[in-house]
Amino acid sequence: MSANEKPLAPDQRLLSIAERRQLHERFEAGQGALRQGRATEAAESLVVCVAEDPGNLLYVAHFLECLKHPIDAAGLGQRLTLMRQEWSFRKAVAGKEYAAVLRLAPPLLIHRPDDSFLLGQLALACSEFRFREAELAWLRWATACRPDDARLLEQAATSLARKGRFDESLEVWTRRQQWKPADSRVGEAIELLHTNVGEQPTDLASANCDQLHALRRATGERPADVAGYLALAEQLQQLGRLDEAEQVVQQAVAVSPGDPAANERLQQLRLDQIRRQLNLAECWAEFDLHPEVRELIDGLTTELHRCELELADHSSQRHPENRQLQWEAAQLLRRAGNFRETLRRIEAFPPDLADSPKALLLKAECLQGVRQFPSALEIYRSAEAAARDANDTPTADKANQRAAALAAALTASAPPDDSSRKFD
């Protein structure tokens, strides 16, 4: 590599099969040495794995396990080498050369496993390359080693929130506040998270305590009764204890895997979990403008749409007579871009629903989506007429706008002498 070339980032340099095999052999050798109590030898093997593949959580976790054991003191020659590596590391940090930080920091940690600066920079470098789980592993180790380091605690709390680990983040922010109680930003973060994550009010929990105990006792006495599990889950859900409610419904599904009510409730609980996470992420985005928060929101939104579609599809198939469920499933299929399946569902609607203004508009949008433009234009105009007759002005205006835009696009794309393509 020339002096002007920068090292490739870890996510840009793909390891070959041979390199991965060599790293795996080193990993196994390190594991074997650790089992035999040779922690220094294990660390020296595993540090190569971590430096070469820094996003591999398995390597990071086992390397951290080594650091819990006593390491032999460095000899004179090794200390000189470490001094040179320290200088290179500091230079990489100053230049924000994060790939070099990931390569240089792990060997230094062998003899300084609780160095807050090393650990903080290593976590920051992992964040730059989106090695999210590895980043959290370093930060958890760092805050365990240095529980009084306010800077590390804030870095860990912020990172956890950016990854949607809001419960953990609240806990770390609370620890952070102990060291600087007057910090307004810390107080703001705690208030935001506590409002959305915190436990239910004591009076609400107490009021339902007896009923909760009775339901738990009932499931213990009748472990094959699915209805008992669902009643307990509903009570927990009302208290906002969604994780516990989901565990209870999973027990119901285990008792009766084919029970449609239990499976539907499980889907609904997961949907509620995602909605709560998304709401929290959107609130957090006002506090933390980091791009990773936007990525979290986008990911949760995609997951929410997928789960909504799964639940609506399952419910509509379970209750084919329910017009509202059929309509919701068709709308969600359209949102997901599955135009052909949406058209198939619309064809199965009862005639009065299929000919309603909103259904006609939905059908036209899907026909346009599958590039059946003349048919789409015709249905747009039918939707507008039906909406005018029903005094549904918003739907009529939307159909009119879509028809005008489609007609203009078709006219503009048609050859000058092809009058059949000009729909006006």
Image: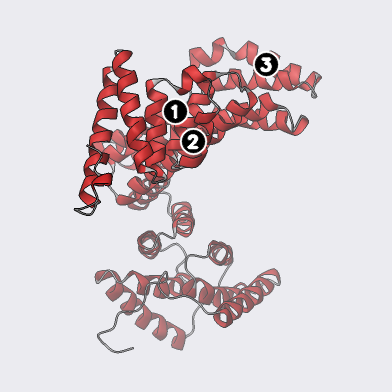
Residue 218, quarter of the rendered image: top right
**Which disc number belongs to residue 342?**
2
Question: Up-down: is 318 above or below 184?
Answer: above
Location of residue 255 in the rendering, given as x and y in whole percent from the top left corner: 77, 30
Tell me where residue 352 appears, x and y as whole percent. 48, 17
Picture residue at 64% right of the left edge, 11% below the top: 210
Q: What residue is at 44 percent from the left and 28 percent from the top?
A: 198
Label 2 is placed on what type of residue? Thr
> Is residue 183 visible to the viewer in this orientation of the structure?
no
Write down the residue under mark 1.
198
**Nearest to N terminus: mark 3 or mark 2:** 3
Circle 3 crowding by C-alpha within 10 Å: few under 14, some 14–19, many from 20: few
Is label 3 in a helix, a strand or a loop? helix
Measured Cα–Cα span from mark 3 to mark 2: 46 Å
Image-based side of 155 in relation to 418, left or right = right
Name the amino acid type tagged 3: His
**Residue 126 seen:** yes
Q: Secondary structure at mark 1?
A: loop
In what quadrant of the picture does the N terminus appear? bottom left
**Is residue 113 found left or right of 406 in the rendered image?**
right
Per the image, the residue denoted by label 3 is 213
In the figure, is residue 297 to the left or right of 220? left
* Callout 2 crowding tier (Cα within 10 Å): few <14, some 14–19, many ≥20: many
N-terminal label among 1 and 3: 1
Amino acid type of the residue that numbered disc 1 sits on in the rendered structure: Gly
